[in-house]
Image (tube, rainbow, N blue to C red):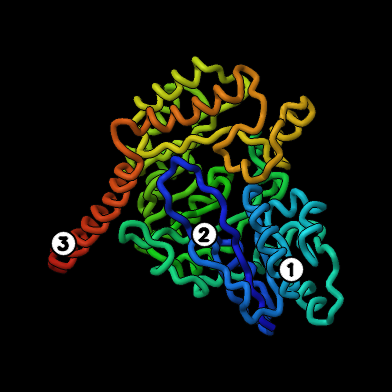
Amino acid sequence: MKFHLIFPKWPKLPVQTPFTLPPLGIITVAASLPDTVAASVCDENVQPINFDGDYDGIGISIMLSCQAPRAYEIAAEFRKRGKPIILGGLHVSLRPDEAMQHADSIVIGEAEGILPQVVRDFQEGRLKKSYSMAGFPDIAKIPNPRRDLYDKKKHYVYKGWELVDLVQTSRGCRFNCYPCCVPYLGGRVHRMRPISHVVSDMKNSSDLLFIVDNSLEQNVEWEKEVFRSMAGMGKRWVSHPISPTPEVLNLARKAGCWYVYHAIYTISDKIKDRIKMFHDYGIGVEGTILLGMDEHTEDFIKRFVDFLLTVDLDLAEFTVLTPFPGTQVYEQMKSEDRIFDTDWNHYNASTVVFQPKQMTPETLQRLYYDAWDNFYKEESQSVKMSKLFLQIYRDKRNDHRGRHRDKAVSPIAR
């Protein structure tokens, strides 16, 4: 059986430096398929889809809501050719009734624990309209992703640098942040992979990694174990929040931490001190800035951007609050009848689709673009990103010099 897995093209933030990372979902699904299935993958963001390929079935992963319209177009094209379609991914789990209209079958929730049944039913000609499982699959049994299915050096390179591989050490999040749907989809329990699986996956990945866990900070002992296991691998990596304590930051730096994403919601000396602390350990910081919260006024957003220019961020990514299904934002705004745009194409975190509390939608949209322009006015995002890549080069050069010095020291001196 030949099964083709597709990750649809999606509209990037229009003001962001354009580079594409290799998606993790479809290669994790590919690894979870039975041995009787020959899997192939296509990331439409970097290569065209072959609609006339020799496939027995098509799987389409809709991770983001803004991918949904394109995913449904792809499904329609394959169905014209008589190919059975199975849809899965985050958006499908959030909007199963909608997704079911465009597929022969859908998978709700994490797919790994139920894929053998889906494949068996497919092969026996009795595919159900939907599949889901009670609870979550045993995370210890989830295999490492099929990274061999990507041509990294051809499709995922930025200015000569091979881009990061996405890795996952855990799933779920015990936090319940207002704009986030992860607790709704992945559960409020932090589920950790066996450390041996994490290590083997990282060793089979490129030298640059993005640890995509929602937050390593939610379990301090776990993050320390992960960082200790990474020491000596020679990797450089990015992640979402890590604990801002000397012990954790020291371990992270020894493990090769390159920079972290840090959500910044307000003007605070605490933020300034925390960024300085990361920098003191040689770790860069990319601020993830959410605009359009109910307490945000036009004056606040202008002062907020001015503040960000004083705290020595290495990068900043501005997004507009978006009422994604499954979030507290969505439930609140739906109950208040404030969502005026339901076109999934616009749910890319750069388009205002709701009525803000303190200003018009047009004002918030203008302030969003002004924030990008003002932050990168003196130095472009491309230049700032290049400086972060240059830091990797410096780190590797220093590591090489350190190893050379160690070899040069005599056994007696040691």
The dot on residue 355 is none
Residue 242 at least partly seen: yes
**Mark 3 Cα within 10 Å, few/some/many (few <14, many 20+)?**
few
Q: In this view, does 214 lie above or below 371?
A: below
* Residue 122 on image: x %, y %: 79, 77
Which residue type does callout 3 highlight?
A: Arg
Name the one closer to the observer, 190 or 32. Answer: 32
Q: In this view, does 161 lie above or below 214?
A: below
The answer to which of marks 1 and 2 sits earlier in the sequence is 2
Q: Is residue 21 above or below residue 287?
A: below
Instruction: Identify the secondary structure beneath mark 1.
Output: strand
Residue 347: which quarter of the image?
A: top right
Which residue type does callout 2 highlight?
A: Asn
The answer to which of marks 3 and 1 sits earlier in the sequence is 1
Q: Could you tell whether 387 is left or right of 297 in the image?
A: left
- Rendered residue at 62%/41% (across/down): 346
The dot on residue 45 is 2
Measure the alpha-carbon separation of dots 1 and 2: 20 Å
* Residue 406 on image: x %, y %: 19, 63
